[in-house]
Image: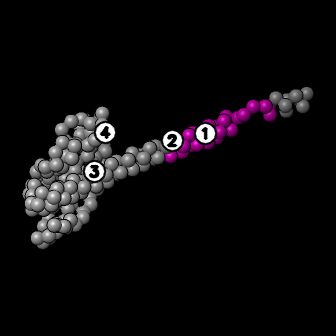
């Protein structure tokens, strides 16, 4: 009879064992969820940072393109860039026009993205989180400093990508 009593008391889990097992399971699930959430946040930030880098590069290329077109037309290398000189800033929309539009530093227009082409511009598409401004500073008669700033916000966090490059008159 004592053997039967011992067998029935040793079967199953106690409440304490069950609580410990559930706690370990909850910790494992919470850890995995936290890691996934961190990975997604890092992916979104990286994606936005890469877009900002390419938008800044496009700004440099557009200013370079204006300089080169002026050289081919045998006119002053800075023709058409007056709106971009400090203390002002400008925006460029290579999809629509190569002529820069003046804006106030820190409050330039938000970029739009055309859903059919994926191109960024200022005239068609839906608003994005990115703002790009270009500021030119004269160094001497044959050299300017080009500063391109791309700003964006996600939630309460504001981010900024800034790049500068010297551009020479090659004429």
Q: Residue at x 28, y 50 (%)?
A: 55
10 Å crowding of disc 2: few (<14), some (14-19), many (20+): few
Q: CA distance from mark 2 to mark 4?
A: 32 Å
Residue 24 lies in the magenta-colored region: yes
Q: Position of residue 131 (x, y in %)?
A: 22, 48
10 Å crowding of disc 4: few (<14), some (14-19), many (20+): few
To which residue does mark 1 refer? 25
Nearer the viewer's eye, disc 1 or disc 2? 2
Assign a secondary structure to mark 3.
Answer: helix
| For the residues bearing labels 2 and 3, Cβ distance under 8 angstroms | no
Q: Residue at x 65, y 39 (%)?
A: 21
Above or below — where is 109 with respect to 11?
A: below
Assign the magenta stretch its main secondary structure.
Answer: helix
Residue 95 vs residue 153, the one in the foreground: 95
Nearer the viewer's eye, disc 1 or disc 3? 3
Nearer the viewer's eye, disc 2 or disc 3? 3
Residue 161 lies in the magenta-colored region: no
To which residue does mark 2 refer? 33
Q: Which residues are magenta?
A: 9-35
Q: CA distance from mark 4 to mark 1?
A: 44 Å
Q: Position of residue 157 (x, y in %)?
A: 30, 49
Looking at this rendering, what residue extends furthest in the bottom direction?
Answer: 140
To which residue does mark 4 refer? 118
Above or below — where is 68 with respect to 55?
A: below
Can residue 128 be seen here? The reply is no
Nearer the viewer's eye, disc 2 or disc 4? 4
């Amino acid at each position: 009879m004592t053997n039967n009593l011992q067998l029935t008391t040793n079967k199953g889990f106690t409440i304490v064992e069950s609580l410990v097992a559930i706690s370990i399971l909850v910790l494992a699930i919470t850890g995995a969820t936290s890691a996934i959430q961190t990975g997604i946040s890092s992916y979104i930030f990286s994606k936005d940072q890469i877009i900002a880098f390419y938008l800044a590069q496009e700004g440099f290329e557009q200013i370079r393109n204006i300089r080169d077109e002026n050289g081919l037309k045998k006119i002053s290398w800075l023709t058409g860039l007056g709106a971009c000189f400090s203390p002002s800033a400008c925006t460029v929309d290579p999809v629509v026009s190569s002529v820069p539009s003046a804006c106030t530093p820190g409050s330039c227009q938000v970029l739009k993205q055309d859903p059919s082409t994926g191109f960024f511009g200022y005239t068609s598409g839906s608003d994005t989180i990115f703002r790009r401004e270009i500021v030119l500073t004269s160094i001497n008669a044959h050299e300017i400093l080009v500063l391109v700033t791309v700003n964006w916000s996600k939630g309460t966090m504001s981010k900024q990508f800034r790049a500068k490059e010297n551009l020479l008159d090659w004429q």
